[in-house]
Amino acid sequence: MKVLAIARNTFREALRDKALYVLVVFSLVLVVSTRILSPLALGEGVKITKDVGLSSLSFFGILAIIVMGAGLVHKEIDRKTILVILSKPVARHEFILGKFLGMADALVTLVVLMLITLQAILLLSGKGPDLPVLKAGFLTFIELLVMTSIAVLFSSFSTTALSAVFTFAFYVVGHLSSDLLLFAARLPSSFARQVCQFMYYVIPDLELFNVRAVVVHGGDVPTDRLLAATAYGLLYTLGVLVLAAVVFSRKDFK
Amino acid sequence: MPDLNVRQEILRHRGNAVRAAESAAETPHPEAVEPVRESLGERRVVVRAVNLGKVFASSFTARKKWAVRGLNLEVFEKEVFGFLGPNGAGKTTTIKLLLGLLRPTYGTIEIFGTGPANPASRAQVGFLPENPSFYDYLKLGEFLRLCAALSGLRKRRDVERRVAEALFVSGLIEHEDVQMRKFSKGMLQRAGLAQALINNPRLLILDEPMSGLDPVGRKEFRDSIVRARENGMTVFFSSHIIADVELLCDRVAIINNGQLEKAGPIGELVQEDVKSVEVVAKDVTENAVLQLEPFVEERRNVGDAVVLRLRDDRATTLVLGTLASHGARILSVTPHKETLESVFVRQVTRASLSHAAEGAEAPGGGGRTKRGL
């Protein structure tokens, strides 16, 4: 109940923040523009629409997390609103969970709006509705949840700017992390191999959520891939949130 | 150096104190003017802090600063407790420790018998932070409903009733649908009171509630505190404004440099007996002055009036009678008592001097277990 109240408030803040609207409008314009440009694409218009649509979902999602999520917790500390919230009978982990759910709620709005637009364009082109695109969109949403939890973790102990940088760094590294395993296999020293493997398990493997290449070319997402990636994403998110709650509950508010 | 700061502090607030006393004199609120001094008897302890200590350590320089050290505090049910100290004395730190916003380095705290680490200890507590700031994108009504939900109110009807009551008490009914970014300082403070009262708390903790308010705002806030006490709440408030504390509180604690200097009912801290009496009169003959010589400590002429300072208040009647029989006109008779202000100044300056002497590094008192250093 208290968690939901905090989540609702966070969502409301996101809605009243102009940044979210800018991101939504931008991404929608981008998707729609692919339709207008499709005559130039020599019959590949639908592929371009799908590709740009799904990519911009990921891109604008992570942008929203960096713009809003990175300050999620720290802004409350900075503005001292945290004093009002935590002086009520609210546990620290409830606050963290509420903040995460509120941001997730804002991301749901973004993702749903994007997917509806994308499907509408595909319908207009006579290629829809496209179920694999929805599955790919869903996996992107799980990826955004992972990134939100990371943003909440960083935001709970560092400043807004720093956590924005850290979160973005994790996003970039997360998309390359499967290379770490390949890299590890070629290393001569077993210690270095273990370090690389350890890094791989700490850093999220965001490429697991990327099924765009298959979907754009008309393929379907295998159900086991969908389930495995979802389970991985949710478990990773849970783990990071627990860590964030532990860090946050030890914090002093001077 | 701290000595000097404290003096400046007090000089600055002396002006405020005079203004507050004036505005209080204009308003016939017997409760506010005359603090009720009941016997403490067997009243329940609401807040108990034992040997509380908090050190702030900088992670870069390894320098430690003791914000609170060896603080013992008891607040009883249904009293107004004033927490008095100069800026930087540790008032806000203590309050944050009570609310679980800071974790004590050592010592124990109980609020209604529960430690602050348990959120349930705050179920019956309302808190107004110093210079509060709220979500400026929210309307006041939305904010209060959020606070009601966070206080554990579930039923819509309960929430609406509490919100309406808080709006009424804080005098903000017509601002329910206004975004809080448009609020003035005084309105924010009242909104802060409204959110503190949203759960109808048994303990109200106010951190510097009157700082930065205009005289009217301060008067209104004092009335709110009196009303809260009349409704059976315990009020704990910190202030560096002595007049407010003197007007409102049953008991007072003076804190300086993180240590409790003095605590007790105002009546015990301030000696009630009159120290001297000042009589101002006109048309005083030399003869009368000669006759009164043994009772008068000091004699001054101010314009065509004479100011006589008497050694003993028991001589007042005699002096007045003698003056009257010599045809003098009495302009005023002023008994001088010790004020809380003079007690405060004495405590704070004495403490600063001794702290300066012993050096600021020593945490004071042995035998404490220090955790988390």
Image (tube, coloured by chain):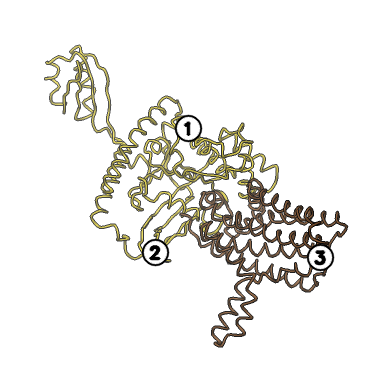
- Position above or below: A57 against B183: below
Amino acid type, label 1: Gly
Front residue of B179/B356: it is: B179
Q: Is residue B100 left or right of residue B22?
A: right
- Residue pictured at 62% horizontal, 40% vertical: B139
- Position above or below: A209 against A13: below
- Determine which residue is flagged by label 1: B217
User: The chain shown in yellow is which?
Assistant: B
- Residue pictured at 33% horizontal, 48% vertical: B262
The answer to whether dots 1 and 2 both sit on one chain is: yes
- Determine which residue is flagged by label 2: B60
The chain under label 3 reads: A
The chain under label 2 reads: B
Q: Is residue B319 left or right of residue B255?
A: left
CA gap, disc 3 to disc 2?
Answer: 53 Å
Instruction: Give percent across and percent down for residue A2.
Output: 64, 53
- Determine which residue is flagged by label 3: A132
Instruction: Give percent across and percent down for residue B50.
Output: 41, 57
User: The chain shown in brown is which?
Assistant: A
Q: Secondary structure at mark 3?
A: helix
